[in-house]
Image (cartoon, coloured by chain):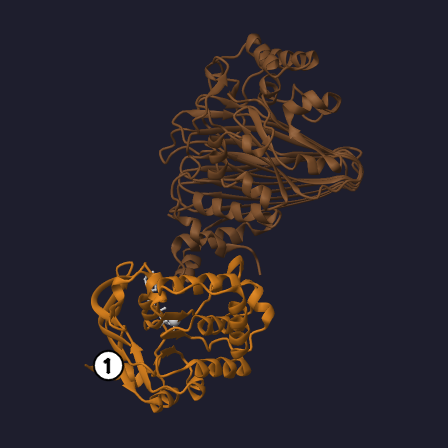
Amino acid sequence: MITINNLHASIDGKEILKGLNLEVKAGEVHAIMGPNGAGKSTLASVLAGREEYEITDGSVDFDGKDLLELSTEDRAREGLFLAFQYPVEIPGVSNVNFLRTALNEIREYKGEESISAKDFMAMVREKSAIVELDAKLASRSVNEGFSGGEKKRNEIFQMAMLEPKLAILDETDSGLDIDALRIVANGVNTLKSKDNATIVITHYQRLLDYIVPDFVHVLYNGRIVKSGTKELALELEEKGYDWIKAEVDAH
Amino acid sequence: MGYTENELAKDLENQEYKFGFVTNIASDKAPKGLNEDIIRFISSKKNEPEWLLEHRLKAFSIWKEMTEPEWAHVHYEKPNFQDITYYSAPKQTKKYESWDDVDPELKETMAKLGISMEEQQRLTGVAVDFVMDSVSVATSFKSKLKELGIIFCSFSEAVQEYPDLVKKHMGTVVPVTDNFYAALNSAVFTDGSFCYIPKGVRCPMELSTYFRINEGGTGQFERTLVVADEGSYVSYLEGCTAPQRDENQLHAAVVELIALDNAEIKYSTVQNWYPGDKEGKGGVFNFVTKRGICEKNAKISWTQVETGSAVTWKYPSCILKGDHSIGEFYSVAVTNNFQQADTGTKMIHLGKHTKSTIISKGISAGKSQNSYRGLVQIHKNAEHARNFSQCDSLLMTDECGAHTFPYIECKNSTAKIEHEATTSKIGEDQIFYCLQRGISEEKAISLIVNGYCKEVLNQLPMEFAVEAQKLLAISLEGSVG
Ligand SMILES: Nc1ncnc2c1ncn2[C@@H]1O[C@H](COP(=O)(O)OP(=O)(O)OP(=O)(O)O)[C@@H](O)[C@H]1O
Ligand SMILES: [Mg+2]
């Protein structure tokens, strides 16, 4: 699905990603953990195509395509989805209108016909049920006045609507209450298939009780410095990051 | 779900001014320049009664004593008023007996403007009066309206057919002496629309006029008069386009609205005159005086979407004379490249319990300058008058300017006046968010801007709203910086 090779990226002349390698196959769930400021959100932004970052080295293959050559919108149309750590508000633009525009752009890119209003509304109903999103939120302006938790839930609703190949969830669990956490995790699990993949960025092993990862990686100082199975997350929860930092810095 | 953003999609290919074509119809025009003879020429061409000629001549002598205003936040080379053609009519000025008689070239023009009358006629609902250069060429649906006693015709026709009505109301809201351009218009106006809604009648369709400047070097000075008699209602639409020309064209219109007791007038404008090219060459000077007067319990709402013109100077206003009358002003003004707009409103509260609302959304892109200028005036007897104003500015680049000049004059202590203003820059984060969902940048901007203007666009009749959204998108293409 995605192969990241020796990725270097900097912003304002400061190198944040320093030779990052990662491979995610279809059907897999990967968790990325790591201390604050390690570069997790940077990785997500770079993959999504945020322009402020300069890629100085490395390559990213996304389903046979050179991801770094694609524009931001084409990456999305190819099936890359980012659930934002801080979802953005767009006043005056209804969620449904926003999504219908997005959906039709993606369809047009794939040479498909645009979705009829009727099919679209049916889809909205079906998908909002998955994340138990209040129908009222679907017709309100994008994220405007949503609570922190509602915004996160809305991200997963959008993901459900757009059916991406690869979804990157950047701290989608932060700010969620226990019930919302379960609902969001449930949504992610429901949408999981052998043809798509998920990268979850999180600080809490708790989320991984619900979304069980195939692999857990530790991102530290711009690199993946340790990989393992879900037991690694438990170990991190128990011991913190210092032992890993010590291991890395010793080299 | 809204009619909004999606429908724009297919229309976004058009980068350039879409309406910049010239129609080849022989026209009957006056020599350039302005003097009493020209005014007599116009008046006689139009077979006008003596009182109207006198009215024109009086306006002309007043105008000669006036100087062009300079207080607006706009800079331009003043027009040479002797280098303008004041009368230009498509040659074939005879009245059309039926739609089939209309010049095919003219029909094509209308089709290009997207208001094919054939279509309009089939699709019910909108009666159109079409003013090209100076003469109104066709009016549809007239007979249907006639049954209700509604008069909707060109201004010239009204002068011939309903001289008493015209004489009674013309100049009562915008007097000849009002301002430089209004005086000029009063002297040389050529055509425009006239509308009268009788007592208690609710006009069942949107009445609409399309204005177009065609002839090179001509000015357009149209005159619109809408009279809503007691307890009546009308929604009136006005759309404007002009071909692409290197020289500046002058447009100085006067619109007068009269809402008698308990009447309501909704007046919507989508103004898309040629804004000039990317270097700021050419474009229409749009110097317009629009004002309405509300008698007891009457209501006037102005809604405008201004995307065109090189220089705009325009303040649709309401005189709230009658007790409990209501004035509203909803405006979106977009400026791009080198466009300059100084626009806003005046709400004059004379009556008791009068209420006004002002919602202004300015969007500036490129190197343009966009100013809101508004006056809220509460007179001594206007007990319990209320005003709410909200003026928002959205900046698309670092090189453009947005300015707000709110003036408040309050002579009654029971008045309640609220004013809110915001300025924001279009968010990179918002655009990135849209891009990440697969939405192109152009469409993202259009979504965000339309969302920003929603309160105003919602005031427009449906067909117009869709058109306005397309225009917003077209005028802002490639404008984020
Ligand atoms: N414009 C910038 N100039 C310099 N440094 C920057 C800039 N933007 C981000 N950084 C730095 O990049 C580093 C990585 O930030 P990033 O947001 O990717 O961390 P993170 O791993 O997601 O952290 P968190 O767990 O707190 O979300 C941080 O040290 C941050 O300060
Ligand atoms: Mg982060």
Residue A124: x and y in percent read 53, 71
Residue beneath the point at 39% across and 60% down? B435
Residue B326's place in the image compared with A87, above or below, is above
Residue beneath the point at 56% across and 8% down? B37
Residue beneath the point at 48% across and 30% down? B74
Left or right: A156 in relation to B388:
left
Left or right: B109 in relation to B300:
left
Viewer-side residue, A61 vs B242: B242
Residue B371: x and y in percent read 52, 37
Residue B112's place in the image compared with A65, above or below, is above
Viewer-side residue, A233 vs B199: B199
Left or right: B173 in relation to A37:
right
Viewer-side residue, B256 vs A247: B256
Mark 1 neighbour class, 10 Å CA radius: few under 14, some 14 to 19, many 20 or more:
few
Residue B171 seen in the figure: no
Residue B60: x and y in percent read 60, 13
Residue beneath the point at 34% across and 87% down? A214
Chain coloured orange in the rendered structure: A
Say how many tags the image has: 1
SS at circle 1? helix
The part of the image, by quadrant, that contains residue B141 is top right
Residue most extreme to the bottom: A231
Q: Which colour represents chain B?
A: brown
Residue B60's place in the image compared with B293, above or below, is above
Q: Which residue is mark 1?
A: A248
Left or right: B341 in relation to B282:
right
Amino acid at the residue labelled 1:
Val
